[in-house]
Amino acid sequence: MTHPDLHPPDLTLDALEAAAGRLLARLPGAPEDDRVSAAPDARTLRYYQTLGLMDKPSRYDGRQAIYGRRHLLQAVCVKLLQRAGRSLQQAQVALAGATDLALEAAVIDGLGLETPSAAQRPAQSPSDPFAPLPEPVAKPLVSAQLAPGIFVMIDPTLVPDPAAMIRRLTGACR
């Protein structure tokens, strides 16, 4: 699953703002909440970084921050979550540990983008050692707020009884 609009070259902050704006402009209507902008501006994108909603820049070219595909996916996902009525705190929980594949799937679904069919995708030889490996399928995590400002994500495939672990951790936070 891939979409050409979700594979930008290296982006400056202004270019990241423009790319996110172009993608989010595909959504019909304005956000229901007047306090939420339709697309993030540069200041908002930097704020997302401070909150951990978006990764730090990939690199710096002199003093210019350079962003990439993952940053674009994160920025669009935050806005999609806000349009769905989620707070930034809830977006933090929802996006914690999200893979690029999960972010891209959320953006494609949220924006209603069509992906090239398997017939249109270039065939990859199984013997090609440089062919990218498929990303693992994300497993649903169990999340909980232990105390104000303290959240935990538990992988139920690794922790046999997530509810019991949450109770123990909540007790430890008191």
Image (cartoon, rainbow, N blue to C red):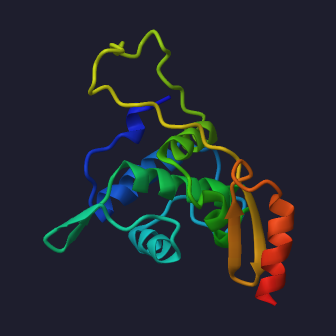
Q: Establish if 170 lies above or below 68.
A: below
Question: In the rendered image, which quarter contains the C terminus?
Answer: bottom right
Q: Residue at x 37, y 48 (%)?
A: 69
The answer to which of 93 and 114 lies nearer the viewer is 93
On the image, the x and y values in percent for residue 99 come to 51, 48
Q: Is residue 145 above or below residue 113?
A: below
Residue visible at 48% across and 14% down?
118
Q: Position of residue 27 (x, y in %)?
A: 59, 44
Residue 81 as seen in the image, left or right of residue 120: right
Residue 31's x, y, as percent?
A: 66, 58
Q: Measured along the vertical axis of the image, is residue 128 above or below residue 21?
A: above
Instruction: Identify which residue is drawn at 83% across, 57% down.
Output: 161
Q: Determine if residue 31 is in view.
A: no
Name the one closer to the observer, 27 or 174.
174
**Percent from the top left, x then y, of residue 88?**
64, 70
User: Most extreme residue toward the top, as rendered?
Assistant: 119
**Residue at position x 74%, y 52% in the image:** 156
Q: Work out which residue is located at the far left of the displayed protein and give it.
A: 62
Report whether residue 173 is seen: yes
Front residue of 15/99: it is 99
Q: Quadrant of residue 33?
A: bottom right
The number of numbered badges drawn on the structure is: 0
Instruction: Depth check: give the residue in front, 85 or 96.
Output: 96
Residue lying furthest bottom in this view? 174
**Residue 65 horizontal side relative to residue 51, left or right:** left
